[in-house]
Structure formats: structure tokens, C-alpha cells
Amino acid sequence: MKSSTIRMLRAYLLVASLGAACIDACVVIAMLVFDLPERIFTSADFRIAMALSLLLLMFAARSLAAVAYQAALATRHATVNGVRGRSRVALRDDCPNRLLVLLHIRIHRQQLATLSA
């Protein structure tokens, strides 16, 4: 497998694991605060709903990363060199949305070049 594919899969797995951790925290809080029984959270309906919510979360993170990437391009915190499919993105160190821009770069399998401020 190409290294760009591995980086893309890692980016998606990172978003999914952060979402799953948030769901777990919400379940524990709901069990402790609202005294909900555990059987509610082990049903098939709950699992399907959480799988769908993880998909929506990944779509939302991808959309938010795209908006941050476009903003970085507009403010010249990021510049793109090369043709589509072989583009190389130069990202400045002082980019305010650096993590989201990096997520977008990894999801779209672009190469990264770092620039100093």
C-alpha cells in the first residue's frame, strides 16, 4: 500500500476513534447521571444509531477540514504547487487552523511541505 493511502486511512481512523471516545463518555455520563440501564446501550438499535452518527461525524470533520483548507488558501497560510493529483501543499507554521488543514491534506493524499513564518 502507498504511504499516502496509509496516511489517509490513519486520518479517518483518528476521527472515528475520537468520535467513539466521545460517544463512550456520553454513555457513561448518561448511565451515572440519569441512571439509565446498561441494556439500552447494548441493543441493536443503539449500535446502528451510533454507527450512523460516526459516519455523520466523519462527514462533518471532512467538511470542516475543507473549509479550513480553503480559508488557509485564501489567507495565504497554505499554497498549492503542482497539478491536481500530484499537488504539493506548502503550509506555514503560523496557520491558525493547522490541524484541520493537515487533516484535509491527509484525507486528499496531498504531499506536505512546511514553511516557516
Image (cartoon, helix red, strand yellow):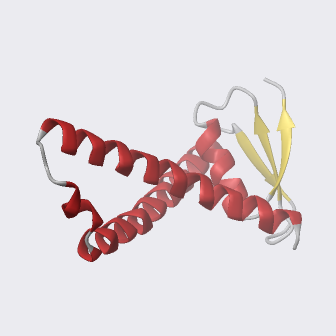
Q: Residue at x 35, y 42 (%)?
A: 25
Given residues 29 and 102, the one toward you in this image is 29
Tell me the quarter of the picture where residue 50 sits.
Answer: bottom left
Q: Image quadrant for the C terminus?
A: top right
Q: Image quadrant for the N terminus?
A: bottom right
Give the answer, above or below, for where 95 lies relative to 113: above
Where residue 102 appears, as percent x and y from the top left, is 68, 46
Residue 28 at least partly seen: yes
Give the answer, above or below, for where 54 lies relative to 94: below
Q: Residue at x 64, y 46 (%)?
A: 101
Where residue 11 appears, as percent x and y from the top left, is 65, 56
Residue 81 is left or right of residue 69, and the answer is right
Residue 74 at least partly seen: no
Residue 17 is left or right of residue 110, and the answer is left
Q: Residue at x 37, y 48 (%)?
A: 24
Given residues 104 and 76, the one toward you in this image is 104
Q: Residue at x 76, y 47 (%)?
A: 79
Residue 6 is left or right of residue 57, and the answer is right
Give the answer, above or below, for where 77 lies relative to 79: above
Where residue 32 appears, as percent x and y from the top left, is 20, 37
**How many labels, in total?**
0
Given residues 60 and 116, the one toward you in this image is 60
